[in-house]
Amino acid sequence: RPAQPAAAVEADLLVTTATLARGLRDLDDLDKNWLDRTTNCKYAEVNKELLGTANKEALLKQASENALVAKDGAAVRTLCKRDPEAVRRILGLDGAVKAKNAPLLAPGAGRAEKRAAEDQNAALQDADRLIRRGLDSVQDFEAYVDAEERWLRAIAAIDAATYSSRSEDLAAVISTTAGGAPVLDAALLSIREARDALKIIVKLLKAAVV
């Protein structure tokens, strides 16, 4: 394949650097707001205290006033759950999981299958390829390769932990009041390792752009 013109190479490098820099900001935000970002409070459950015979009058009152579905009524309580899929969305590991039937692909799933499920809005959904593409442009080749290897190890660990969290942290995935999420929370260390590796990669790419 013929070599790209210098202007096209530079433009490509600028896009790569900007995209990875946006992903770096996402990882920084995830680290700083870990509990908030991995907790989903968009659920509701019926207030079981109102189901008793003694509370029949209160239940009927709430039903008539709130149709038993308003989250701000006493008939319904807000329910929070830990959400490993939030991490996977940010990293583009298996894509938009907003739909209930969206796949949660196992670690090591085929790249073509993974890409078909990826969230195209995630800055890091194609980070592996972008990082490889930047390899030819940097001056400190060894530092870049080392950071890339650290990135890949961290992402593999995050992939495995967030996938396993759905079953191993089952109580917290059902409700935060039912238990903790040690498998998911253990992934935070790998998130920081991925962020630190990506920080080096972005720094070296920015130096190549100047």
Image (cartoon, rainbow, N blue to C red):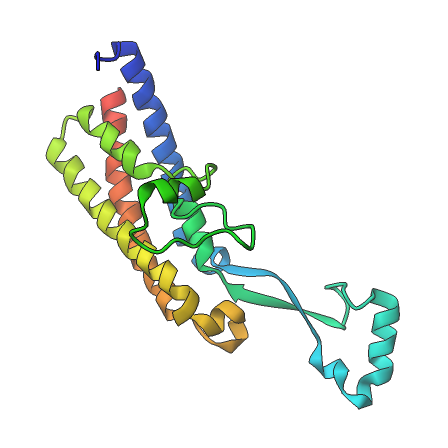
Q: Quadrant of the N terminus?
A: top left
Q: x and y percent of residue 134 in the render?
A: 24, 28
Q: Is residue 123 left or right of residue 1?
A: right
- Towards the viewer: 199 or 122: 122
**Residue 190 drawn above or below residue 130:** below
Count the labels in the image: 0
Quarter where residue 147 is shown: top left
Name which residue lies at 20% across and 47% down.
Answer: 150
Q: x and y percent of residue 53 in the render?
A: 80, 89
Q: Tell me if residue 119 can be seen.
A: yes
Q: x and y percent of residue 141 in the render?
A: 13, 31
Name which residue lies at 33% across and 54% down.
Answer: 159
Q: Is residue 43 left or right of residue 181?
A: right
- Towards the viewer: 164 or 205: 164
Q: Give the residue furthest to the left.
A: 142
**Residue 32 drawn above or below residue 186:** above
Quarter where residue 117 is shown: top left
Q: Is residue 12 left or right of residue 29?
A: left
Name which residue lies at 11% across and 36% down.
Answer: 142
Q: Quadrant of the C terminus?
A: top left
Name which residue lies at 46% across and 37% down.
Answer: 120
Q: Tell me if residue 202 can be seen.
A: no
- Towards the viewer: 23 or 25: 23
Q: x and y percent of residue 90 in the render?
A: 43, 46
